[in-house]
Amino acid sequence: MIRNQKNSPSKTALARRFRRVMTFAEKCFWNACRNHRIGGLHFRRQQIIKGFIADFYCSDFNLVVEIDGAAHQTQEEYDQERDRIMRQHGIRVIRFSNDDVVNHMDTVIRRILSDPTLPSPRGEGNSEQE
């Protein structure tokens, strides 16, 4: 939970619904990262941050991972503004396409773990992805 932020009941309900009805790519990423499987990092799904619902959020390192499907092609300006607002609050955003997540998970994981804002991988539970 992000501290000191108020969320509307409708936004909270929407985030819960998104957690129940994930896209195939989101399910793939969640299966790869749940239980600290990516470098020991703890991710939460559909986290509300500054009024936006982030696909995946690692609070220890203020890192958002977004999985972008076809809908994001028509909302590039919105996504850029959203990313800018998150950056203003010290949150790093990494975006991947559905195709990358579904077909190139090893590359996705390497990119996350090579992020300069993260410490060296702890190697906890990451054996399935190496």
Image (cartoon, rainbow, N blue to C red):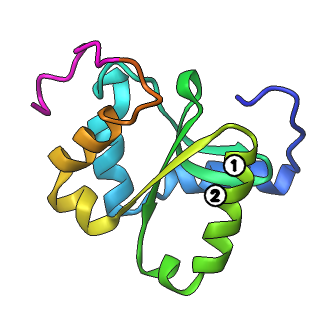
| Residue 111 appearing in the image | yes
Q: Is residue 87 above or below residue 126?
A: below
Residue type, numbered disc 2: Asp
Q: Determine which residue is flagged by label 1.
A: 86
Which SS class for mark 2?
helix
- In the orientation shown, which residue stands out farthest toward the front? 116
Span shown in magenta: 120-130
Give above or below for 71 relative to 51: below
Quadrant position of residue 3: top right
> Residue 6's x, y, as percent?
90, 40
- Dot 2: few (<14), some (14–19), or many (≥20) neighbours within 10 Å? some
How far from the left and from the top, in percent, is residue 59? 59, 27
Left or right relative to 38: residue 67: right
Residue 118 placement: quadrant: top left
Left or right position of 14 against 43: right
Does the magenta-highlighted stretch encompass residue 127? yes
Residue 83 is labelled as 2
Q: Residue at x 31, y 32 (%)?
A: 113
Q: Are marks 1 and 2 in contact (CB under 8 Å)?
A: yes
**Looking at the image, which residue is at 61% across and 69% down?**
79
**Residue 128 among those drawn in magenta:** yes
Distance (Cα) linking label 1 and label 2: 5 Å
